[in-house]
């Protein structure tokens, strides 16, 4: 890597928008969870796709690694830099370029955040449904193939990105897909770049699918005697084909944390949080059907939230769960597990997780998740520097992944690979991992796009 | 290509299941539409994935092209062999391997047809929704990224293939995806092979997403004074967010053809065929809302088909439309256009198509399509050997594609590229087509998988 030469050229291109300040480098080197600080050598703030292409060409010429940055909410160290290089921060490319209400789509720059997008869409009657909780950028959400609470109804980023503009590793600008809602023309490059975590190119524009704001929304919380009862209610609900918009599990320890953090007063029991979208009558009907299923599984203490402010409070509580859990041990670091299994194995996976967590000294680690997809998280807290506790957390996560893979599930439902899950790629994908490596090798022969991530390391 | 050496080895592997009979070669060399006969040199009938891998390794060793075959219903000449080679017919790999009702998924071999799958699923309360009309194999439907009448509600093959087993060009067996409903682990190889038309590997197993059979289904036909009125009704319906299960346009000429073929008695006017899926009350509510929208656009003469036999007759009519149109000129060959445009440009695209068709002597060519996706087809008939008529048909299709691309649409909504649309790849994809070529080059360096298709030709 000829870093200094690259920095000289980048400075000449970007002026003040190439930052070398230590505080800026540190901000872009930190992780949301437990990965050690890894500051880049410089932070570039491009304003246009053309600048991104020029940055990439400069870096390619000097074999200088490039890591993309949205707002840094990824949980597996996706933005950590392994061996130096330039962080490309997309915060100045945050324009909503065009809303197409007739086509139910929107074209945006990658630095737009989820909340900013929906704020802009409010008056159109449309919304973008993918909701990972954090107010992430859409570029980052696409790169991580994020999902969240609404995936059970609306799908993940895989399902809601219609087309991309991408700067490839050689600085070429390509477009994947058109404004048509479907196409049978050629390889699905859109899907290839979604979830690639910046290892194949930099996303510079996204066309996203929008959905109509439902006429009616109704939300509820319901307590269950055990996690198993709650999960069985979920399984039956999914099989009935009830079009749940959200169906989320919070176990007793999660409830305890959110009660304290959000000044709620839920009984300290496992809960399901549900939401229905549709016409007034459809929402009422679905709620009744779900109520019957929940009652069959000893669900009790329904609290309905049909008013917008009540619903907002409910989901604000759910969305703040991660910070609520962090707040139970101020200053602690977190490891968040993220396995996703076939629904048929969900109960036994959660049971086994609880057993493993207890064995490793994490008996009160909160479990919550998007159980309608078979995806759940345990949040393990440990003090910085407590290597024993950190090792036990890593071991607990490891056991969970092993079990998920054994059940034909995946090491990550929505958080992605980053640094944290790299070690499971061979086991989960077998020979297919080699195919991923071949694609990386041909599209990024100099290995400058987020090197060291996602694909097998090169000899 | 060392064809004879390959045939000797394949015969030793497969015995009677390697066919060299002229009639068999001819069957596998014909096209459903207008492409000239192109018989392969041999037809292999593997029974297992392992045999497919061995066939591929033999062919790779001898640089012998391989083209996969389901039942031959593709419309763009996807299975036509350009310069000799072996056709791999999957008809003996037609087992339904496992139904997973709890996970709402099924694992099958690629030779299972759409109708056989749904027949098998009937008792489970689940169904597979993608419905291109023809009783195609699921392997073929995945390879073409097929969709059809229900895509507006349930998505295309892109959305409904959860995982694949694939034999790569070097004869390696890989698995893309798990039994979990979602994953953020690595490149989306499933999506890469879906729509690749056999140019990257051979699909040997599919895990598909299933959906719950709706409690109630209601269908209807409704006549409109003009195609524009019908399309405007569709646009408004989609924007309202009505969850239509199907919304299909048949213009006057299509109606005339199906009336004659299916002994129907519809008024000779443009029609929409719609279907609603849901609970009894949801279906009633949706039907009422749609009725109001249709009335606003001068829709009249609603005929409801809530009874299963009436609905079956309705969709049998729609599904036989292609054969109904062929029957209007016995012995004729067909060219079926397949553009897909953003909904906002649908009216003007259909208008322009009607104008171009008239100018080229096809004023009565039927237009029908999946207008909820912006996808429609004109079927142009000409007698075999009438090169003038065929050239005019090709020119009409060409003008339609040019217009679709100009409107940021695609040359093919669901029929794929094959031989017919290859010439538009550069224009539609620009530099991204080169990226496709790089992926092909690295995954099939000997260029044996359906060579000459989909990607730029090699020097």
Image (tube, coloured by chain):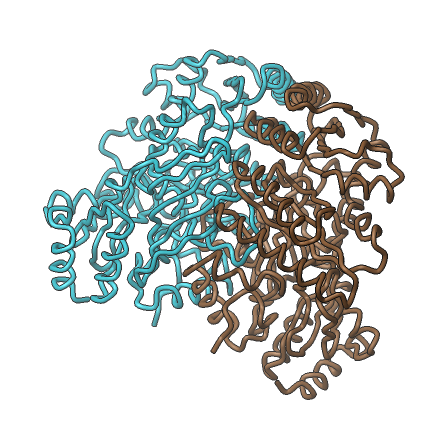
Chain colours: A brown, B cyan
Q: Quadrant of residue A57?
A: bottom right
Is residue B72 shown left or right of residue B19?
right
Identified at 48% across, 49% down, the residue is A406
Whole-percent x and y of residue B375? Answer: 50, 39
Q: Of A294 and A169, which appears nearest the observer?
A: A294
Question: For the view shown, which residue lies furthest in the right direction?
Answer: A263
Count up the numbered dots: 0
Q: Quadrant of residue A49?
A: bottom right
Q: Is residue A169 visible?
A: yes
A304 over A29 or under it: above or below: above
Whole-percent x and y of residue A89? Answer: 74, 67
Q: Is residue A219 visible?
A: no
Q: Quadrant of the C terminus of chain B?
A: bottom left
Whole-percent x and y of residue A130? Answer: 68, 44
Q: Of A183 and A451, which appears nearest the observer?
A: A451
Identified at 53% across, 18% down, the residue is B215
Whole-percent x and y of residue A184? Answer: 45, 47
Q: Quadrant of the N terminus of chain B?
A: bottom left
A448 over A229 or under it: above or below: below
Identified at 63% across, 74% down, the residue is A56
Q: Of A424 and B164, which appears nearest the observer?
A: A424
Q: Quadrant of residue A419?
A: bottom right
């Amino acid at each position: 890597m000829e870093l200094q030469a690259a920095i000289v050229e980048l400075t000449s291109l970007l002026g003040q928008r190439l930052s070398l300040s230590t505080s800026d480098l540190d901000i872009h080197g930190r992780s949301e969870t437990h990965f050690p600080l890894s500051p880049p050598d410089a932070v570039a703030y491009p304003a246009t796709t053309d600048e991104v292409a020029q940055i990439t060409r400069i870096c390619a010429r000097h074999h200088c690694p490039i890591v993309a940055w949205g707002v840094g909410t990824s949980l597996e160290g996706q933005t950590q830099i392994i061996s130096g290089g330039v962080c490309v921060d997309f915060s100045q490319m945050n324009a909503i370029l065009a809303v197409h209400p007739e086509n139910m789509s929107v074209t945006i720059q990658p630095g737009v955040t989820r909340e900013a997008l929906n704020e802009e869409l409010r008056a159109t009657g449309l919304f973008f449904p993918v909701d990972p909780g954090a107010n992430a950028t859409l570029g980052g959400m696409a790169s991580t193939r994020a999902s969240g609470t609404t995936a059970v109804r609306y799908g993940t980023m895989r399902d809601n990105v219609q087309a991309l503009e991408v700067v490839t590793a050689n600085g070429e600008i390509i477009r994947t897909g058109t404004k048509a809602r479907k196409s049978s023309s050629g390889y699905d490059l859109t899907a290839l770049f979604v979830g690639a975590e910046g290892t194949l190119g930099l996303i510079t524009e996204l066309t996203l699918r929008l959905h109509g704001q439902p006429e009616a929304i109704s939300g509820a919380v319901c307590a269950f005697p055990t996690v198993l009862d709650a999960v069985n209610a979920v399984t039956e609900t999914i099989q009935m084909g009830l079009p749940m918009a959200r169906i989320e599990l919070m176990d007793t320890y999660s409830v305890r944390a959110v009660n304290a953090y959000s000044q709620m007063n839920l009984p300290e029991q496992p809960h399901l949080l549900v939401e229905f979208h549709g016409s007034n009558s459809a929402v009422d009907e679905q709620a009744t059907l779900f109520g019957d299923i929940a009652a069959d599984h000893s669900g009790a203490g329904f609290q309905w939230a049909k008013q917008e402010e009540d619903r907002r409070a409910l989901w604000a509580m759910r969305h703040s769960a991660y910070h609520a859990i962090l707040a139970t041990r101020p200053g602690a670091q977190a490891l968040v597990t993220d396995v996703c299994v076939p629904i048929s194995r969900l109960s036994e996976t959660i049971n086994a997780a609880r057993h493993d967590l207890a064995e490793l000294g994490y008996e009160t680690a909160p479990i919550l998740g998007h159980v309608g997809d078979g995806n759940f998280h345990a949040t393990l807290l440990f003090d910085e520097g407590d290597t024993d506790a950190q090792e036990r957390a890593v071991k607990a996560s490891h056991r969970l992944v092993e079990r998920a893979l054994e059940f034909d599930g995946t090491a990550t439902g929505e958080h992605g690979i980053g640094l944290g899950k790299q070690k499971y790629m061979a086991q989960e994908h077998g020979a297919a991992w080699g195919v991923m490596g071949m694609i990386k090798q041909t599209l990024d022969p100099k290995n400058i796009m987020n090197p060291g991530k996602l694909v097998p390391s090169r000899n």
